[in-house]
Amino acid sequence: MGNEEERSAPTVSRRSFVLRAVIGVFTSLGALVMAVPFLRVVFNAAPLRKAEWAEAANISILPEGQPKDVKFEAHSVDAYLRQMKLRSVWVIKHSPEIFSVFSPICPHLGCYYKWDPSTQHFECPCHGSVFTITGKVIGGPAPRPLDTLPYKVQGGKLFVKWERFQVGIPQKVRV
């Protein structure tokens, strides 16, 4: 009985083994090539977007020592869609070269706060957070000071890098 089983077992020729190996290699390479776009999406699902410098204002029009709501256009990149978006920041000019630039988004839950000249504070209308002119929290549920943005002065103009930060947490984490 043992001899009959050995005789009836199919034998694999060298040619069919090599053919199967070659087909397996090419099939694997084809699957890998087709999987690359999918893997790129999976592993780069939420990459940090590179912030770009945008011209925000001519520094000569900014009042010294008073917050100014400055609106400017900045490039926005979302996947493959690149467009210009209107952005807003609060700018305080301390001297011709020294500024404070704050994101207009409250770090509590993301509402837009305003400057109240009568109280000399930034105030969020949503949940009552109150901030000093330096961005320090002095009232309300905000978990951290106002978020500052990078800036540079070049040729009499103020350039800002627009960034967003996660709200509701004590750390300043870019999103």
Image: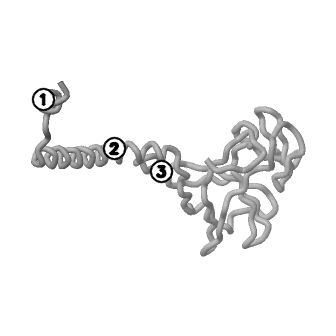
What mark, if any, has residue 33 been given in the picture? Answer: none
Q: Position of residue 85 (x, y in %)?
A: 52, 48
For label 2, the SS is helix
Q: Is residue 31 left or right of residue 124?
A: left
Above or below, comparing residue 153 to residue 48 in the picture: below
Tell me the quarter of the picture where residue 134 sits: bottom right
For label 1, the SS is helix
> Which of the two marks, 1 or 2, is nearer to us in this view?
1
Tell me the quarter of the picture where residue 105 sits: top right
Q: Position of residue 79 (x, y in %)?
A: 44, 46
Residue under numbered circle 1: 8
Tell me the quarter of the picture where residue 54 sits: bottom right
Q: Residue at coordinates 73% horizontally, 52% vertically from top-left?
A: 147
Residue under numbered circle 3: 77
Q: Is residue 2 left or right of residue 33?
A: left
Disc 2 residue type? Ala
Q: Position of residue 32 (x, y in %)?
A: 31, 47
- The reply to whether dot 3 and dot 1 touch (C-beta < 8 Å) is no
Q: Position of residue 15 (x, y in %)?
A: 10, 48
Q: 72 and 130: which one is in front? A: 130
Above or below, comparing residue 52 to residue 26 in the picture: below
- Mark 1 and mark 2 lie on one chain; the one further toward the N terminus is 1
Residue under numbered circle 2: 35
Q: 116 and 21: which one is in front? A: 21
Q: Residue at coordinates 64% horizontally, 66% vertically from top-left?
A: 158
Q: 55 and 39: which one is in front? A: 39
Disc 3 residue type? Val
